[in-house]
Amino acid sequence: DAGVIQSPRHEVTEMGQEVTLRCKPISGHNSLFWYRQTMMRGLELLIYFNNNVPIDDSGMPEDRFSAKMPNASFSTLKIQPSEPRDSAVYFCASSLLGQGARTNEKLFFGSGTQLSVL
Amino acid sequence: QKEVEQNSGPLSVPEGAIASLNCTYSDRGSQSFFWYRQYSGKSPELIMFIYSNGDKEDGRFTAQLNKASQYVSLLIRDSQPSDSATYLCAVRASGGSYIPTFGRGTSLIVHP
């Protein structure tokens, strides 16, 4: 398996533009997480999907952020309009949670998207 | 608010020494505890997990859990320069949620 695949690796955009980040989880995993990482705040959970359903979106900063998971193999995180304070590394992670073995709690992270909003 | 606290460091140790990384958490009912390693510019990677009080060893790594005191630690024996990275502690809280909360990480530098 190729692991969790994120695109793009780098995104530079201007304030006010729409940004869409993409994620393909590991095949067979039932859980998907979007995290944001900054030096100031560390790794913050934005939203968690289980079986394609958003379970916890309490970490989504505001209405400018939205996330979808239309099927088990694809998810998007959209920021519209983007602002300079959104600049961060955005990670997608997947796992096979609630399937008995505690070892399944391991999160597999994608390579991340480095977002710069000018 | 469930919190996971780590000293940001950097923790600097000489090659061959034992590096000790610590993490405290606020939710007394927490169930699962993880250590992720993150190299600069890379994504986090799980290196250890522990669920029960006591020690768990895997090669040069030992995770220690003390639920009464609400801390978990990671010991790295015979530290190597390749161990230089940020180490993130993650804790899964009580209840049905499988969502882990991450600490901000401790930067470890192993110098030759």
Image (cartoon, coloured by chain):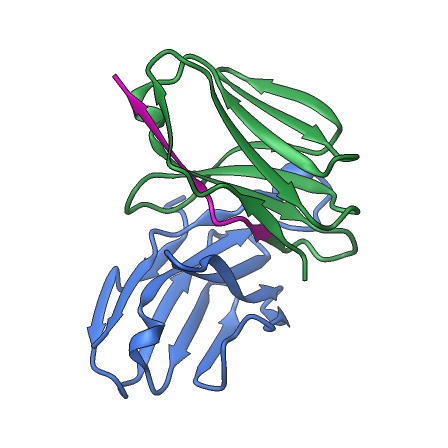
Q: Position of residue B42 (x, y in %)?
A: 32, 45
Chain A color in figure: blue
Quadrant of res B85: top left
Instruction: Give the main secondary structure, helix, strand or loop, of the magenta stretch.
Output: strand
Point out the image quarter for the N terminus of chain A: top left
Chain B color in figure: green
Q: Position of residue A11 (x, y in %)?
A: 23, 68
Between A43 and B70, the one nearer to me in the picture = B70
Between A111 and B56, the one nearer to me in the picture = B56
- Residue drawn 29% across the image and 77% down it: A84
Q: Is residue A80 left or right of residue A63?
A: left
- Residue drawn 42% across the image and 73% down it: A77
Q: Position of residue A102 (x, y in %)?
A: 69, 39
Quadrant of res B51: top right
Image position of B63 with respect to B6: above or below: above
Q: Is residue A41 left or right of residue B112?
A: right
Residue segment shown in magenta: B101-112
